[in-house]
Image (cartoon, rainbow, N blue to C red):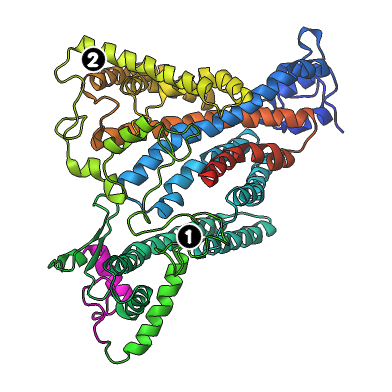
């Protein structure tokens, strides 16, 4: 062990050393230890470095005893803020983008929504490496490994127990196989002891291939499986063919060549065109309904010219070799149905309710609700702890007519008659004086925070400990609400959006100053933040004047840019919180001589997984 003193160190600068070595390289109660704590890890130093400096003549043990309860509360609070920022401020924008673009629910889940769910883990991982370039990867890998193990064992086990069993369907097997394959590939690269560009591109390729598989399964589900369900429903409702025998015969026709004379059309558009699942009547002359670009590709890829499952009369006589093609088609159909998470009994009432009590055992799945996008967040989202009142449910049903992917495009397709509001919505300021609109917006903000406080104290599901931490977190919640604009459904508050448009540049300047050490308030003699803040205040003032009230829709061309700004600002909050969390965990690890890999594998992994556990438990109970 080499001990350094004031004479042989480099001006008491220990930036080239990792903070984990402070006890090995310095003497107790020495000035070197104080300098080491302030300059280790590339001059970033340790959290609460003053405890190593005999401040107020108190040694390290005394300081740790005094700070222990406060640091424990701060650690729990950081974990809560990291999860709540990702859940309540980062993910709503991604969920809105998914719904407005009409993305299939499962495809959205593995892309945009997965980004929101993994934002905390990504930020903590990056912060651990940035804080300690030499050995920070150990905490990062420990956190990722521990989180994967915790979610795959503890969270999955609790969810299965709460749900009283889960059917092992094709999509679950598909996802597990892909997960195992990914682990094998990652292990093979780590076993070599070096991660290069080839490994990185391989990881990206694995994820991209999984996304493509999910997308293909969703497209097949919408283009083939849903029409088949509608065919069976039409047969059941009409009472044709002697009940289930006719249904089975209809299935055989579908397997052989498509929907027989069913005139079932499915139009699927992603990224700007309407997503619509519609059943055309048998009397309509709707040949054009079957010729959307996506359906044309499906006809070319999955069927031949005379037996397309998307073309009326698809059960025409098979050409030469049709029997072989029919077998191949039936095999492909069975495989694709399995990969799209649905079994042969989809669309029918579960026949074995007496022996199975798992997810969906009491539901009769039909083609109308099979592909419905599940809203997770917000006042009416599935993850809301407090049940919605009947008035809220009625208001939600009146405010959002219809459901399914087609309803997601309502704001886009209806058009706008003003800059901020959809057609049919009444803006607050078109006939209202500026002063009245400002006072109304102020009252909306006050009412918003009153409702938030009432939610804390009046929600019976909040324990005394939850209420304590929610109140301790309240100042940070207020700052986040005032700096992150959220124009999404169930989060929209006109006055709060206007305030956040004004104050978000201020927070961004603070973030750059404390995290990136760049002073945008006065960079190169130019006040960037001040000018942007003034511009934001003007935009916010006009927003108060012309934006709709909370019970009306905000125009898509206005809500999307605001949501994107909120997405960026929320990401800076997550990065800041994750950085403070990693610094605190590094400090705790140094004090108790716990290696960074163990801290990542346990505390950091458990803390980052608490949000997954809570959300999945809520969904399982519902």
Depicted 191 relative to depicted 128: above or below: below
User: In this rendering, does residue 603 appear at all?
Assistant: yes
Would you say the residues marked 2 and 1 are in contact, meaning their CB atoms lie under 8 Å apart? no
Asked if residue 159 is positioned above or below residue 291 in the image, the reply reads above
Of residue 422 and residue 51, the one placed in the foreground of this image is: 422
The residue closer to the viewer here, 458 or 124, is: 458
Q: Which residue is mark 2?
A: 437
Mark 2 to mark 1: distance in Å?
49 Å
Instruction: Judge by depth and name the residue closer to the eye, 261 or 590.
Output: 261
Q: Position of residue 493 (x, y in %)?
A: 34, 24
Give the farthest residue toward the left: 285
For disc 1, the marked residue is 210
Q: Position of residue 49 (x, y in %)?
A: 71, 20
Please state if 277 lies on the left or on the right of 285 as rendered.
Answer: right
Disc tally is 2
Q: Position of residue 75 (x, y in %)?
A: 65, 27
Residue furthest right as drawn: 1
Q: Is residue 309 magenta?
A: yes
- The span shown in magenta is 292-317
Q: Which mark is residue 308?
A: none
**Residue located at (25% from left, 87% from top):** 317
- Local secondary structure at mark 1: helix
> Where on the picture, by quarter, is residue 243?
bottom left
Q: Earlier in the sequence, mark 2 or mark 1?
A: 1
> Magenta span has 418?
no
Q: Residue at x 73, y 17 (%)?
A: 67
Prevailing secondary structure of the magenta residues: loop
């Amino acid at each position: 062990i080499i001990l350094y003193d004031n004479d042989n160190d480099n001006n008491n600068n220990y930036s080239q050393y990792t903070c984990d070595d402070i006890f090995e390289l310095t003497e107790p109660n020495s000035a070197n230890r104080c300098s080491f704590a302030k300059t280790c890890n590339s001059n970033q130093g340790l959290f609460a470095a003053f405890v190593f400096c005999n401040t107020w003549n108190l040694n390290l043990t005394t300081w740790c005893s005094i700070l222990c309860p406060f640091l424990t509360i701060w650690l729990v609070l950081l974990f809560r803020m990291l999860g709540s920022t990702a859940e309540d401020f980062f993910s709503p924008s991604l969920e809105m983008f998914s719904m407005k673009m009409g993305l299939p629910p499962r495809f959205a889940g593995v892309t945009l929504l997965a980004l929101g769910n993994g934002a905390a883990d990504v930020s903590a991982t990056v912060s651990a490496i940035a804080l300690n370039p030499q050995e920070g990867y150990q905490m990062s890998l420990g956190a990722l490994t521990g989180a994967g193990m915790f979610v795959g064992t503890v969270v999955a086990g609790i969810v299965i127990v709460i749900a009283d069993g889960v059917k092992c369907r094709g999509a679950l097997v598909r996802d597990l196989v892909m997960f195992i394959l990914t682990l094998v590939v990652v292990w093979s690269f780590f076993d070599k002891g070096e991660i290069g560009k080839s490994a990185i591109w391989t990881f990206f390729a694995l994820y991209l291939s999984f996304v493509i598989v999910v997308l293909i399964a969703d497209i097949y589900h919408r283009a083939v499986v849903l029409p088949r369900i509608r065919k069976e429903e039409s047969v059941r409702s009409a009472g044709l063919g002697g009940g289930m025998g006719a249904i089975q015969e209809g299935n055989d026709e579908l397997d052989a060549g498509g929907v027989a004379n069913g005139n079932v059309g499915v139009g699927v558009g992603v990224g700007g065109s309407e997503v619509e699942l519609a059943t055309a009547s048998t009397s309509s002359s709707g040949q054009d309904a079957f010729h959307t670009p996506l359906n044309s590709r499906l006809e070319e890829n999955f069927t031949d010219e005379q037996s397309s499952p998307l073309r009326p009369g698809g059960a025409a006589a098979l050409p030469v070799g049709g029997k072989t093609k029919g077998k191949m088609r039936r095999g492909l159909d069975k495989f694709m149905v399995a990969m799209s998470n649905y079994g042969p009994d989809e669309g029918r009432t579960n026949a074995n309710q007496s022996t199975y009590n798992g997810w969906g055992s009491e539901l009769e799945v039909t083609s109308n609700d099979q592909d419905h996008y599940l809203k997770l967040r917000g006042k009416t989202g599935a993850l809301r702890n407090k049940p919605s009142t009947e008035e809220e449910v009625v208001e939600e049903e009146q405010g959002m007519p219809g459901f399914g992917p087609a309803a997601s495009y309502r704001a886009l397709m209806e058009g706008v008659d003003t800059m901020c509001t959809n057609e049919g919505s009444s803006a607050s300021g078109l006939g209202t004086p500026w002063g009245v609109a400002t006072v109304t917006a102020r009252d909306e903000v006050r009412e918003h925070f009153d409702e938030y406080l009432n939610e804390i104290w009046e929600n019976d599901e909040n324990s005394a400990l939850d209420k304590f931490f929610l109140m301790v977190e309240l100042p940070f919640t207020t700052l986040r609400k005032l700096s992150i604009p959220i124009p999404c459904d169930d989060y929209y508050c006109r006055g709060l959006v206007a305030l956040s448009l004004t104050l978000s540049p201020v927070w961004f300047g603070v973030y750059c100053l404390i995290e990136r050490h760049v002073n945008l308030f006065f960079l190169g003699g130019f006040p960037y933040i001040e000018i942007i803040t003034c511009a934001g205040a003007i935009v916010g003032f006009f927003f108060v004047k012309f934006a709709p009230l909370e019970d009306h829709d905000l125009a898509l061309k206005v809500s999307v840019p605001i949501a994107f700004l909120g997405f960026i600002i929320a990401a800076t909050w997550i990065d800041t919180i994750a950085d403070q969390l990693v610094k605190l965990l590094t400090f705790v690890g140094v004090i108790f001589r716990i290696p960074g890999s163990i801290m990542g594998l346990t505390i950091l992994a458990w803390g980052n997984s608490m949000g997954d556990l809570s959300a999945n438990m809520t969904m399982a109970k519902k």
